Amino acid sequence: MSKRPVAFSRSRRRFVQGIAAGGALCLLPGWKGSAQAAEQSRNVPVLSGTEFDLVIATHDVNITGKKRQAVMINGSLPGPTLVWKEGATVTIRVTNRLNEPTSIHWHGIILPYQMDGVPGISFPGIAPGETFTYQFKVQQSGSYWYHSHSGMQEQLGMYGALVIEPAEPDRNQAERDYNIVLSDWTDENPMTILAKLKKQGDYYNFNQPTVGDFFRDVGTQGFSGALAKRRMWNQMRMSPADFSDVTAQTYTYLYNGHTPS
């Protein structure tokens, strides 16, 4: 699930399809009015301050015309954008209403390891019906994201954006910030997808090299060059078409939880 700033016009109702499979968080830097701007970015909820209450639960969704169940934070997909301030101490109470353990990992955040949210490493996880309190001092600023580190919950919708405002005013002021979360959704059970990939790594990739491609390479690289090219891919156990393991065959790409149209 890569994160880099991306400029995006709010007036556009479509975005370019063909994003690499996996969630992606894209937040424009600049801090003036970030919470207000986030509210205007396709209505993703925004929570700011130093105390937060997050509830993890399943909810029915209909993204592709089929009713499915998602794992959401405060009933939102993606989860609420959390706005912190560099230097502040934040307290985040996370309540688990699932029938399985859960967790939240603060991706890229500098904090005590006990607060990192990785079950089996930094803490045991959050058991069903329990509330875990994360508390730490914010030591940085920038655009980040948070997500579940339990099972396939991230693939089912459990992720959100983090905006950390700097302690000092930004030298490069912007009139408005746009918080954009690019992600993907599948109507398949994510565990089923994983099982298919373990059996056949290119299960979702239909753009396979053909005999015609081989003769075209012979024409441009020679017979030995065409063979060497294929030998290289075979040694890596990959295909030239292996841009991503999971494609739009099963993924629908989302912009702040909305489909491209």
Image (cartoon, rainbow, N blue to C red):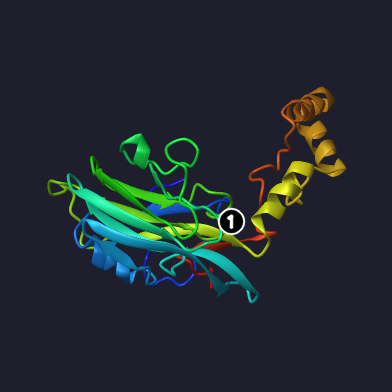
Residue 43 lies, with reference to residue 94, above or below; the image says: below
Residue 82 lies, with reference to residue 106, above or below; the image says: below
Q: Is residue 89 visible?
A: yes
Which of the pair 226/207 is nearer the observer?
207
Q: Identity of the amino acid at label 1?
A: Gly
Q: Where is residue 22 in the image (x, y as percent from the top left)?
A: 56, 51
Q: Tag count in the figure?
A: 1
- To which residue does mark 1 refer? 18
Q: Residue at x 24, y 58 (%)?
A: 51
Which of the pair 190/124 is nearer the observer?
124
User: Looking at the figure, which quarter contains the C terminus?
Assistant: bottom right
Q: Is residue 178 visible?
A: no
Q: Where is residue 216 in the image (x, y as percent from the top left)?
A: 80, 38
Label 1 SS: loop
Q: Where is residue 53 in the image (x, y as percent from the top left)?
A: 32, 62
| Residue 93 occupies quadrant | bottom left
Residue 208 lies, with reference to residue 76, above or below; the image says: above
Residue extending farthest to the left is: 168
Q: Which residue is drawn at 62% across and 71% down?
A: 68
Around disc 1, counting alpha carbons within 10 Å, would you say few (fewer than 14), some (14 to 19), or many (20 or more)?
A: few
Q: Position of residue 166 (x, y in %)?
A: 19, 47
